Image (cartoon, rainbow, N blue to C red):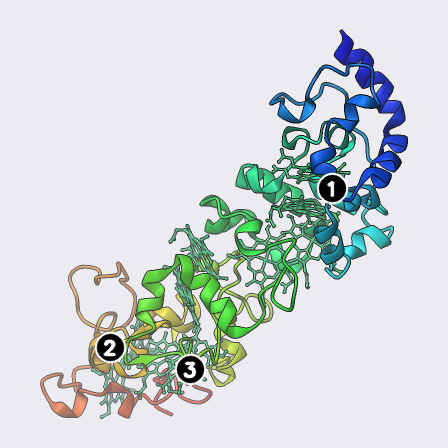
């Protein structure tokens, strides 16, 4: 009973209390009982309770939050999210803190963690929802729901530290730090970049996000798409783009990884097999059963291809335009 009476009073007095706190600070945490002096129920010790207040919380404004959480407020002023506080676009002008933490009136009254939302303690799905209220329609997060990072409960906050500051705080951009971030969970992938033929990721000459979109993709494997729905490989290997008059079906249909191991490989040119011939014969052989990857397509080389002769060992000596040709349907030139 007393609790409700107090809550009703305080709800109306939120602003005054905020001002009072501002006066009583710098060290609000130790001043917690001050909340009680301002309210009738002087015997309760709000900071120790574990149940949230029943009053519906209202917005108090970022400035109020900043009176106690000074370091965060100072850092926040330099972060891109400051735009939420200063702009009209997202409907949280002056209330940016509460755009992620929810209305804070109960929290500033009780000073208890149970009265404020902390995305770090929410389920990943709820955290994502918080972020996606504003970031949903950005190209960067399209495909998010299809992606295994979402399915496997890797929340936005696993990769973005909202309150960190400095050049690589909110978003890691430096090549070395992007790679360190990804490798912290994908240790096996890090190992494949130690193979003799590989992309220069360990040297930090490029990053995982050159090929993958960490936010998700409509393609398998979180593949980044260049323009339209092309694989991101074309960003650097533009000569393989085409369009070719005579395409080699798997390049388009199955993607580069049907012949290459894009992370790293024991084999020259990062091929999936030791010899070029073996790559080709995975699909171009008179096989009674589908090949190891379940692919049954591809035509059988004509009879003059004497596969026992070394002359035919390196198919690409003749079939030079293996990624597609403008003039020859047999990809010879
Ligand atoms: C009067 C001082 C004061 C004000 C104003 C204040 N807080 Fe707090 N806040 C605290 C204290 C004290 C704690 C530590 C509570 C604990 O650990 O139990 C805290 C903890 C938190 C936490 C961490 C909760 C957790 O799960 O550990 C968040 C998030 C938070 N505050 C956000 C806010 C936001 C957002 C605002 C503005 C709406 C705000 N605070 C205003 C004093 C304040
Ligand atoms: C874009 C969403 C977002 C905004 C805006 C935001 N926070 Fe946070 N806050 C978080 C997340 C997420 C965490 C959990 C820790 C983390 O991931 O950095 C957090 C954690 C906290 C904590 C707990 C202590 C800690 O560092 O873990 C406090 C206190 C806090 N925020 C206060 C504030 C204040 C004050 C503001 C406004 C100046 C604010 N937050 C604005 C998302 C946000
Ligand atoms: C109330 C709306 C809102 C919410 C909620 C929100 N953001 Fe933002 N976010 C913005 C705005 C506005 C910017 C400023 C950059 C811009 O113009 O897009 C921004 C910027 C960012 C950036 C930096 C973009 C850059 O290019 O540097 C990241 C990363 C980010 N937000 C992640 C998050 C995460 C993670 C969450 C959830 C914990 C979150 N945001 C919640 C509105 C929001
Ligand atoms: C697996 C790690 C990871 C997760 C999970 C993640 N991000 Fe990112 N995010 C990144 C990286 C890395 C970048 C920098 C991308 C780059 O440089 O191309 C980035 C960039 C961004 C940017 C800046 C715009 C851009 O594309 O450069 C925004 C905004 C953003 N993320 C929001 C979010 C939101 C919202 C979520 C949750 C739905 C989220 N991120 C989840 C790693 C992640
Ligand atoms: C917090 C841990 C964590 C971080 C950090 C992380 N990932 Fe992941 N990632 C996972 C988990 C868990 C899965 C799903 C299980 C799996 O396939 O290994 C996954 C899956 C993937 C997949 C496979 C998708 C599929 O559908 O097969 C790719 C690609 C990927 N992550 C790339 C990245 C990149 C790039 C980064 C850095 C920007 C990154 N990850 C950072 C945990 C993480
Ligand atoms: C040169 C482009 C490229 C780079 C750089 C790259 N990847 Fe990949 N990655 C791929 C391709 C292509 C696939 C296969 C996608 C598919 O399954 O369709 C893949 C698959 C994956 C998978 C799925 C499981 C697996 O091992 O096949 C994970 C996880 C992954 N990459 C993580 C990473 C991480 C972490 C980094 C950075 C250390 C990274 N990748 C760098 C192109 C790249
Ligand atoms: C950010 C640019 C970039 C992207 C994206 C990229 N590559 Fe590369 N790739 C390179 C560079 C640079 C080299 C040369 C490597 C070296 O010499 O260290 C290379 C080398 C290769 C080679 C071996 C060439 C040789 O002569 O040994 C293959 C095969 C290859 N890339 C395939 C791919 C595939 C498949 C993808 C997409 C999954 C891809 N690349 C995405 C930059 C890129
Ligand atoms: C049908 C199998 C196959 C597919 C699919 C394939 N490649 Fe290749 N690629 C090869 C073979 C075989 C070689 C080696 C040629 C040689 O040694 O003469 C090669 C060589 C390369 C090279 C190095 C030599 C050069 O021509 O620059 C790069 C780079 C490359 N491929 C990129 C790609 C990219 C990017 C894709 C996807 C768009 C792709 N490959 C798809 C079979 C394939
Ligand atoms: C992943 C399966 C696959 C691999 C590996 C592969 N091919 Fe193909 N190839 C195909 C398919 C499918 C076609 C289209 C067949 C059709 O049009 O009926 C094709 C077409 C061709 C053609 C043109 C034939 C025609 O009638 O259009 C040539 C030449 C060819 N491949 C040579 C090669 C060589 C050389 C290699 C090895 C470097 C190779 N292929 C690797 C699947 C593959
Ligand atoms: C000495 C040059 C040479 C080598 C080496 C060679 N081919 Fe060919 N291949 C040709 C020529 C020429 C044709 C076109 C035949 C025609 O037009 O009737 C052809 C045609 C093909 C075709 C198309 C068949 C069709 O019905 O359209 C395939 C598939 C093929 N080769 C696969 C391979 C494979 C796999 C290898 C490696 C084991 C290989 N070739 C090695 C010269 C070569």
For mark 2, does the 10 Å Cα neighbourhood hold few (<14), some (14 to 19), or many (20 or more) residues?
Answer: some
Most foreground residue, 323 or 36: 36
Q: Is residue 209 in sight in this rendering?
A: no
Residue 330, image x and y in percent? 34, 84
Picture layout, residue 131 above or below residue 103: below
| SS at circle 3 | loop
**Within the image, what quadrant is residue 5 found in?**
top right
- Using residue 313 as the reference point, say whether residue 87 is left or right of it: right
Residue designated by label 2: 266
Residue designated by label 3: 324
Nearer the camera: disc 3 or disc 2: 2
Picture layout, residue 275 above or below residue 143: below
Picture layout, residue 57 above or below residue 88: above
Q: Residue placed at 75% from the left, 52% from the top? A: 73
Mark 3 and mark 2 lie on one chain; the one further toward the N terminus is: 2
Q: Residue placed at 38% from the left, 92% from the top? A: 333
Most foreground residue, 237 or 189: 189
Q: Residue placed at 74% from the left, 26% from the top? A: 33
Q: Calculate the distance from the C-alpha at mark 2 to the C-alpha at mark 1.
A: 61 Å
| SS at circle 1 | loop
For mark 1, does the 10 Å Cα neighbourhood hold few (<14), some (14 to 19), or many (20 or more) residues?
Answer: few
Residue designated by label 1: 27
Mark 1 and mark 3 lie on one chain; the one further toward the N terminus is: 1
């Amino acid at each position: 009973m007393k609790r409700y009476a107090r809550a009703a009073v305080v709800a109306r007095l939120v602003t005054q209390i905020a001002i009072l706190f501002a006066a009583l600070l710098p060290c609000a945490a130790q001043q917690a009982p001050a909340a009680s002096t301002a309210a009738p129920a002087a015997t309760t010790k709000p900071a120790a309770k574990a149940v949230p207040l029943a009053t519906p919380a209202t917005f108090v404004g970022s400035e109020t939050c900043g009176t106690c959480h000074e370091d965060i407020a100072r850092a926040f002023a330099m972060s891109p999210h400051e735009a939420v506080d200063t702009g009209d676009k997202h409907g949280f002008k002056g209330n940016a803190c509460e755009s992620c933490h929810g209305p804070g009136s109960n929290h500033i009254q009780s000073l208890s963690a149970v009265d404020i939302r902390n995305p770090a303690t929410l389920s990943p799905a709820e955290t994502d929802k918080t972020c996606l209220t504003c970031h949903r329609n950005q190209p960067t997060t399209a495909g998010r729901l299809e992606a295994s990072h979402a399915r496997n409960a890797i929340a936005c906050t696993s990769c973005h530290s909202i309150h960190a500051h400095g050049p690589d705080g909110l978003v890691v951009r430096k090549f070395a730090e992007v790679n360190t971030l990804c490798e912290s969970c994908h240790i096996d992938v890090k190992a494949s970049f130690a193979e003799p033929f590989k992309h220069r990721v360990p040297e930090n000459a490029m990053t995982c996000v050159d090929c993958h979109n960490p936010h998700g993709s409509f393609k398998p494997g979180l593949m980044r798409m260049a323009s339209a729905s092309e694989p991101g490989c074309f960003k650097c290997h533009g000569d393989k783009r085409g369009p070719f008059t005579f395409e080699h079906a798997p390049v388009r249909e199955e993607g580069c990884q049907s012949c290459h191991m894009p992370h790293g490989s024991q084999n020259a040119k990062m091929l999936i097999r030791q010899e070029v011939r073996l790559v080709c014969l995975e699909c171009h052989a008179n096989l009674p059963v589908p090949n190891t990857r379940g692919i049954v397509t591809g035509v059988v080389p004509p009879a003059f291809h004497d596969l026992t002769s070394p002359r035919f060992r390196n198919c690409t000596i003749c079939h030079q335009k293996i990624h597609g040709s403008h003039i020859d349907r047999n990809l010879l030139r």
